[in-house]
Image (cartoon, rainbow, N blue to C red):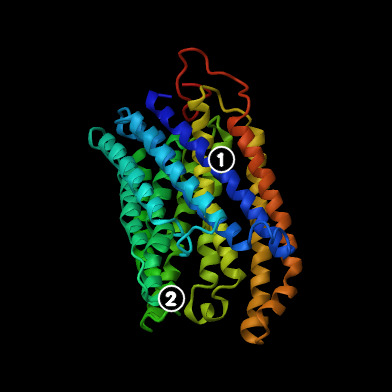
């Protein structure tokens, strides 16, 4: 590890993984209710399980992004983090706000807006913490080297903060509410977060392939352009049925189709860089995550998103289990796998060990990814059946749910597989280290076992 303050990332990774574990637990509880509707009805209602599951996802991904930024920024800017103490303070504030919101949900304390259920004071704390983070990283960038990686990363993070401000706007008109609600939810996950994803992926490829930075940066600019071009107007595919003008239906069908392009470009980008560069980097597990991330993201966000994004298809599939299938695989591929890949790459350097527990890490990759893919298939089949029975034949919603019981049981089984894979990864990250880096050793680089 070249810069001492890269260790600032470690507590962020630890908190993120703790919340990731809780997210998986609440996901299993919710999946169990789908299969066995009476499960825990007197202890914790289903909507509390669901809001806990989705909010934990958002919170731990944000903390993960922060940890990834604190890890790569010193190397990219070629200087230490501006203020490590400020980083620890903003993590404490963010973690407290997230924990307070989670506890509040268990007692029915929330604002009721999906993904933005946090009470007002929690939103204020999150904003303060995020601004502290942006100040700390922006000062580091301002005083250091500017690269395409850290500039695109900071652009994505600043835009995420800007669009977060719409979470404070809660109009009484439901159509207007949904219009601006998507400015947070969609423009994050299908817009500016893609900039964060592309820059972090580019960083991993620079470190592990040995391909010239200039080549990777050219690809990065193309991907960023595609993401912003398609993602901004692609927001309109959420405006089909909320009372917005009808021109959003043809316009957004076109731009939503184009949203596949940046994810396909990322797949080509990653595999091309590994093909051109060195493929004997010692951290094979990190290489696996770096290639798996854009691949699964392409299918989850790209292919499964396209399956029901056209207005004349979405008319029937909107709000069915097809949406759940797309959401699970898209989030997992684009952002969960990305952060797990950066942690896989970073932990050996942070803990001063050679790549360790790699076989267990890669087993975790395959078990968790297989479980998530199987979950996506079962939810897709459930959604197709649901669409036909409910939206075409007109059957009652609860009658249709009884017909989907087998799919829900299979989904629960795949969720258990995801949990097992997550456990393998956590042990690989934080379990006993096998081989220490010799005293005075430096960071492992592409093509060698040591630097």
Left or right of 425 on screen, residue 256: left
Give coordinates of residue 413: x percent, y percent.
Answer: 73, 55
Q: Nearer the viewer, residue 291 or 124?
A: 124
Which label sits on residue 215? none
Residue furthest out toward the top = 439
Please say if 416 is above or below 440. below
Q: Label 1, on which residue?
A: 18
Q: What is the quadrant of residue 162 in the picture? A: bottom left
Give how far across and how far down residue 90 sits, in percent.
37, 38
* Left or right of residue 104: residue 245: left
User: Residue at image x 69%, y 44%?
Assistant: 420
Element under disc 2: helix
Q: Residues within 10 Å of mark 2 (few under 14, many from 20)?
A: many
The x, y position of residue 277, in whole percent, is 47, 38
Residues packed near mark 1 inside 10 Å, few (<14), some (14 to 19) or many (20 plus) = few
* Residue sitting at x 62%, y 49%: 24
Name the foreground residue: 167 vs 142: 167
- Report, in whole angstroms, how far the alpha carbon at label 1 lies from the one at label 2: 39 Å
Total marks drawn?
Answer: 2
Reading the image, the residue beneath label 2 is: 253
Of badges 1 and 2, nearer the viewer stands 1
Q: Residue at x 42, y 58 (%)?
A: 262
Q: State left or right for residue 61 relative to residue 49.
A: left
Q: Nearer the viewer, residue 412 or 309?
A: 412
């Amino acid at each position: 590890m070249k810069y001492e303050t890269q260790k600032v990332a470690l507590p962020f990774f630890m908190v993120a993984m703790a919340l990731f574990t809780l997210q998986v637990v609440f996901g299993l509880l919710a999946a169990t209710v789908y299969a066995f509707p009476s499960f825990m009805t007197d202890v914790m209602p289903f909507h509390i399980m669901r809001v806990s599951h989705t909010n934990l996802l958002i919170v731990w991904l944000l903390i993960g992004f922060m940890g990834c930024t604190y890890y790569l920024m010193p190397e990219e800017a070629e200087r230490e983090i501006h203020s490590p103490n400020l980083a620890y303070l903003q993590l404490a504030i963010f973690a407290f706000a997230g924990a307070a919101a989670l506890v509040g949900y268990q007692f029915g304390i929330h604002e009721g807006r999906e993904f933005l259920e946090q009470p007002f004071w929690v939103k204020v704390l999150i904003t303060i913490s995020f601004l502290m983070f942006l100040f700390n990283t922006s000062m580091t960038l301002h005083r250091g080297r500017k690269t395409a990686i850290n500039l695109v990363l900071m652009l994505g993070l600043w835009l995420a903060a800007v669009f977060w401000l719409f979470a404070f706007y809660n109009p009484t008109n439901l159509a207007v509410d949904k219009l601006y609600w998507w400015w947070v939810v969609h423009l994050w996950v299908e817009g500016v977060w893609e900039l964060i994803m592309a820059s972090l992926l580019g960083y991993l490829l620079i470190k592990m392939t040995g391909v010239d930075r200039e080549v990777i940066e050219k690809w990065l600019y193309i991907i960023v352009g595609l993401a912003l071009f398609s993602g901004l107007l692609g927001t309109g595919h959420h405006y089909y049925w909320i009372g917005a003008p009808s021109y959003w239906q043809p316009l957004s069908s076109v731009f939503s189709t184009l949203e596949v392009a940046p994810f396909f470009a990322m797949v080509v980008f990653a595999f091309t860089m590994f093909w051109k560069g060195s493929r004997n980097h010692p951290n094979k597990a990190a290489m696996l995550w770096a290639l798996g991330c854009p691949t699964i993201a392409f299918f989850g966000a790209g292919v499964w998103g396209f399956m029901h994004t056209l207005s004349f298809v979405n008319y029937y599939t909107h709000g069915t289990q097809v949406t759940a299938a797309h959401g699970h695989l898209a989030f997992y591929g684009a952002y969960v796998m990305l952060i797990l890949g950066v942690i896989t790459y970073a932990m050996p350097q942070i803990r001063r060990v050679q790549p360790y527990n790699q076989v267990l890490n890669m087993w975790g990759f395959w078990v968790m990814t297989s479980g998530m893919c199987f979950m996506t298939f079962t939810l897709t089949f459930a959604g197709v059946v649901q669409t036909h029975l409910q939206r075409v034949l007109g059957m009652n919603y609860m009658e249709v749910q009884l017909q989907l019981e087998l799919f829900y049981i299979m989904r629960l089984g795949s969720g258990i597989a995801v949990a097992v894979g997550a456990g393998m990864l956590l042990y690989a990250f934080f379990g006993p280290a096998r081989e220490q880096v010799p005293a005075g050793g430096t960071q492992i680089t592409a093509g060698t076992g040591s630097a």
